[in-house]
Structures are given as C-alpha cells and as structure tokens.
Image (spheres, coloured by chain):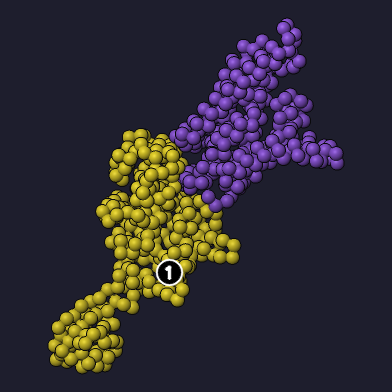
Chain colours: A purple, B yellow
C-alpha cells in the first residue's frame, strides 16, 4: 500500500496541471473573499451611518461562499477526475496496472492521495479566505467550535464529491464527463428536478445527492442528509471500484 | 525464471481474439512473437499481464503475477510508444514508474543514459518522436531490472542504428538468464534477434519452436543445381523418388535437404554440375507461407 501511495503521489505531483489547478482554486477563493468583503462593506456603507446592515451573513457562510462555489468545485473536481481520466487518456493506466496487478491498492491510493490534495488545498483556501473576511466587522464571527464543525462537514462533502467524480470518470473513462456530470447535477439537474417534480413527489429533493450534501454542509438535518449523501457516494464508489477491478485496462 | 501461458482465451462479443493459447517462455533466449495484424499478439500480452480480463492464466516462476511481492522486479512491459503523460518530463515519468519498487533516482539516470535519452531527461515527451517514445518505453520496462521483458513492437520507428542497438541489448539481456518476449513485424530483424518463435494466427497457436525448426518447415527449402544436362539429371533424381522442378535454363530446384545427395546422383550419371546451392527460406517467407489467408485486414484480392 505504501508503494501505491508513493506511486500516486509521484504521479499527481509531477504534472504541472495539478499545481495549476490547486493554485487557481486558492487564488479564486481568495479573490472571491476579497470581493465578498468589499461587497459587504459597500452594502454596509450604503445602508447609512451607524445603521445595522440588512443582512446577517456569518463568517463561516462567507468563507464557504468563497471556497466551495462552482468555480472552485470545477477546479478541484478536475483535479480529482485527473486521477483516473488522465491515466486512461494517455494509456498510462496500463503501466500503472502492470506495476500493481492487484488493482485494489492503486484504487485506494488514488482516492487517498487525491482526496488529501483536494482537502489540503481547500483548507489553505479556507484559511486565506478566513483571514481576508475576518477583517470585515460586518460579518458575524462564529465560535471556534461552530467554525470547526463547518470545516469538518465541508471536508466530508468534498471527499464525497471527489469519490463521485472518481466513480464517474472510471465508469465513463472520460475526464471531462467525470467533472461535468457531477457539477451539472449539483448546479442544474437537481434544481430542475426539484422545481418540476416537487409538486408530485415532494420527497424527491430529500433523496438527491448534492441537495442532501449541501444541506449537510449547511448543518440542516445533518443525520438524514448526511446519510442520503453517504449512500449515493457509497453506491457510486462501489460501482466505480467494481468497474475498475473487472474491466479491461 | 520461466513464464507459462496456459489456455489464454479472450472473446470480444462474437469474436474470439485469443483462442486457448498455451506456450512457455524460457530464460536465456530472445523469443519472438509473430502473427499477422489483428492476430491477437497485443491482446495476448495484455492477458499475460492481467490488463485484459479473460480466461486462462500466466505463471511467472510458477506463481501468478499478483502473488509476487514486487511485480516490477518480475516483469517489465513496453506495450506502446505513446504510453506517457505528454506533460510529465521523461525523468519524472521514470521516477513515477520506479516508485513501486522504490528505485533510486541514480538508477533512473542510469537507464535514461542507457537508452540514449540522458539529454532529454528534463523534456516533456509531447515533442518526442516515435523512436524516442520507444526508448522511453524501453527505459521504463528495464528500470527495475526485471527477470522478464515483454515488448510489443519495440523496433517501430527506430532508425537502423537504434534497431541494431536494440537487438544487441535484448540478446545481452536474455543472455543474463532473463526471459525476453518481443513481438515485431520486422521479420528480417526478428530472424537476427530471436532464437525461438511463438507464432499465432487468428488467435490460435501455429508454432512454438526454435527459429531454425520453424524455418525448416518451409516447402521452399530446396537445393538449386545448375548442370550441363538438367533433363537427364531430373530423370535420374525422379527415378529415385526426388522431386524436381525446372529453375531457369540450366537449373533444377530439387526438393531435398542435403545437397550432397544431388551431387552424388549427378556424379553417378555423368552429368557435369556448375552450381550446387542449398536454399533456405527466410523467416519472412515461412511466416507468409504459414499464415497466408489468415490476415485479419488483408487488402482486396491480394492476401499473401
């Protein structure tokens, strides 16, 4: 297992695109934090001298807006999709699986290394966004415990998101689809399903993966939403693993 | 170490690409793997490595590849000259491949030097020619000093000097007690390189023997004799059951293995002999003879 992790680390760290994606995710998050801070300040000043602004953004929600928005998810999702997508595109999966004829260790190594890079990138982006937004007194500071809990939930969500990206990339063997399909579901499809079907089947929103996942991050009915999101992640990950294990390389 | 492929079979839909293939690769010799396009050579190699899922198994020193602690120490494979990330430098590519067996960086540099890519080590292979890609692939295959080398068309795209280098290298590698299994369409080159051949056609084994035995199978092996009276000599040879066919104005192609036999018949019949030559078919001729009509992608009406 150690050698598989070493292999995967050398794979992911030896291509420029990894660091470009990580750098872009951090820069975008920080830039958005600056914009958000400026927007809060601008709205506050236009609200009148000494008046309390008509919004109650918490610091954690603001940091979350800067670090888990669609742009950052595209960047980190692409990073995750590359773990399998690049290997299939360039044929290097055959070199990898010649070195590791037992496929399970390399699958686990890819999950561990890639999720670790994504989570560390997210945490760096979060720290920078926090430092930027903390200076804005209009934002309501959270307790350390509350902010910590938010970070843990977001990290869990990101890992789940990466596992879904892995699964779809392995099943389709197309890097772009590995990113586009989850993001399309998260940003468009689930919203449409919710709008169109909620009248007929109001429960449907409660069983959609990303709606549940984002509700879990927000701390809403965490047990149920976390369970629904977890089931989706588990089912797709097992499907991806079985395809990876059984299909021709 | 010997390698036993046992009952390898691979079916794609209704087509059987590899059909119950069994052969053994012995150490110390270069074994050539021959077959027409689409005959299943690459699929066979992938089955041996466990990359394709099919029936049968391959034993590497009596064990499955998955049962060895370090697969890279057992087998090094080079299956395609384009199996690399175009944006990862040649050196980083090999460092990645060396991670499984924790190969030191000094070995990476040594191998790059050995295949003639030392000056390209820090370059990204997106600009590499096919020949350079072959060298990088070979470097990856030999990186961990494996006891078996599996190479799929490694000479494609190489210039004559590089092919000669490859031939010498593979013979040296095999002579160190390793198994070397090479597929190639360059049959003239294979004849110089390999001492043993495994030949398949439409996924079925048609030969697994030393090159010399394979070549001796040809009906084109004969003796050319040029004589003062070829007709009289032909009658004398036919009388003792040796078949002949005219070859030129004063020549006969005699279906016999030993030219001395022809010389003795000519002498005893008082026929002057001007030339007596044993003609042996080339590997290419025997290959074409045995696989004629079994090309998967033959041009219309010109199967050879």
- Vertical comparison of A50 with B127: above or below: above
> Which residue occupies the foreground of this view, B98 or B269?
B98
Residue at the image position 51 percent from the left and 51 percent from the top: B51
Question: SS of the residue at dot 1?
Answer: strand
Whole-percent x, y for residue A18 in the image: 50, 33
Residue A4 in view: yes
Q: Quadrant of the C terminus of chain B?
A: bottom left
> Which residue occupies the foreground of this view, B114 or A133?
A133
- Vertical comparison of B217 with A212: above or below: below
- Vertical comparison of A66 with B61: above or below: above
Whole-percent x, y for residue A34 in the image: 60, 19
Q: Residues within 10 Å of mark 1 (few under 14, many from 20)?
A: some
Whole-percent x, y for residue A101 in the image: 50, 46
Residue at the image position 45 percent from the left and 71 percent from the top: B299
Q: Which chain is indicated by disc 1?
A: B
Residue B237 occupies which quadrant of the picture?
Answer: bottom left
Q: To which residue does mark 1 refer?
A: B206
Residue A145 occupies which quadrant of the picture?
Answer: top right
> Which residue occupies the foreground of this view, A61 or B9?
A61
């Amino acid at each position: 297992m150690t050698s598989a992790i070493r292999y995967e680390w050398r794979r992911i760290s030896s291509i420029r695109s990894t660091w470009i994606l990580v750098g872009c995710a951090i820069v975008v998050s920080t830039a958005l934090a600056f914009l958000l801070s400026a927007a809060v300040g601008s709205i506050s000043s236009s609200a009148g001298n000494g008046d309390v602004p008509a919004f109650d953004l918490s610091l954690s929600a603001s940091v979350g807006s800067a670090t888990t928005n669609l742009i950052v998810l595209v960047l980190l999702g692409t990073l995750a999709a590359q773990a399998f997508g690049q290997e299939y595109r360039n044929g290097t999966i055959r070199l990898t699986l010649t070195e590791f004829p037992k496929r399970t260790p390399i699958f686990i190594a890819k999950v561990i290394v890639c999720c670790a890079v994504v989570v560390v990138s997210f945490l760096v982006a979060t720290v920078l966004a926090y430092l930027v937004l903390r200076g804005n007194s209009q934002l309501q500071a959270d307790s350390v415990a509350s902010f910590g809990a938010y970070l843990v939930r977001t990290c869990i969500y990101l890992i789940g998101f990466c596992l879904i990206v892995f699964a779809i990339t392995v099943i389709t063997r197309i890097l772009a689809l590995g990113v586009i399909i989850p993001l399309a579901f998260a940003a468009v499809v689930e919203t449409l399903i919710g709008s169109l079907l909620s009248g007929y089947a109001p429960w449907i929103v409660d069983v959609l993966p990303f709606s549940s996942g984002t509700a879990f991050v927000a701390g809403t009915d965490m047990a149920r939403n976390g369970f629904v999101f977890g089931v989706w992640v588990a089912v797709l990950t097992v499907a991806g693993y079985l395809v990876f294990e059984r299909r021709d390389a | 170490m010997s390698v036993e492929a046992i009952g390898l079979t691979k079916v794609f839909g209704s087509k059987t690409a590899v059909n119950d293939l069994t052969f053994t690769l012995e150490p110390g010799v270069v074994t050539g793997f021959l077959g027409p396009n689409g005959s299943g050579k690459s699929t066979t190699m992938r089955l041996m490595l466990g990359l394709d899922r099919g029936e049968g198994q391959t034993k590497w020193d009596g064990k499955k590849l998955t049962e060895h602690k370090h697969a890279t120490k057992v087998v090094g494979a080079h299956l395609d000259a384009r199996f690399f990330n175009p944006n990862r430098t040649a050196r980083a590519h090999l460092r990645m491949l060396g991670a499984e067996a924790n190969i030191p960086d000094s070995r990476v540099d040594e191998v790059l030097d050995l295949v003639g890519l030392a000056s390209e080590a820090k370059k990204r292979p997106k600009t590499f020619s096919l020949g350079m890609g072959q060298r990088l692939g070979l470097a990856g295959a030999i990186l961990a000093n494996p006891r078996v080398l599996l190479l799929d068309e490694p000479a494609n795209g190489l210039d004559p000097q590089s092919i000669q280098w490859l031939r010498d290298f593979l013979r040296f590698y095999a002579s160190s007690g390793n198994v070397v299994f090479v597929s190639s369409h360059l049959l003239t080159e294979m004849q110089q390189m390999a001492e043993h051949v495994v030949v398949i056609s439409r996924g079925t084994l048609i030969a697994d023997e030393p090159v010399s035995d394979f070549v001796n199978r040809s009906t084109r092996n004969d003796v050319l004799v040029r004589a003062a009276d070829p007709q009289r000599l032909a009658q004398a040879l036919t009388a003792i059951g040796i078949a002949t066919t005219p070859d030129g104005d004063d020549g006969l192609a005699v279906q016999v293995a030993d030219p001395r036999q022809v010389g003795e018949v000519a002498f005893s019949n008082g026929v002057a002999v001007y030339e007596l030559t044993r003609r042996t078919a080339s590997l290419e001729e025997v290959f074409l003879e045995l696989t004629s009509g079994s090309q998967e992608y033959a041009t219309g009406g010109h199967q050879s």
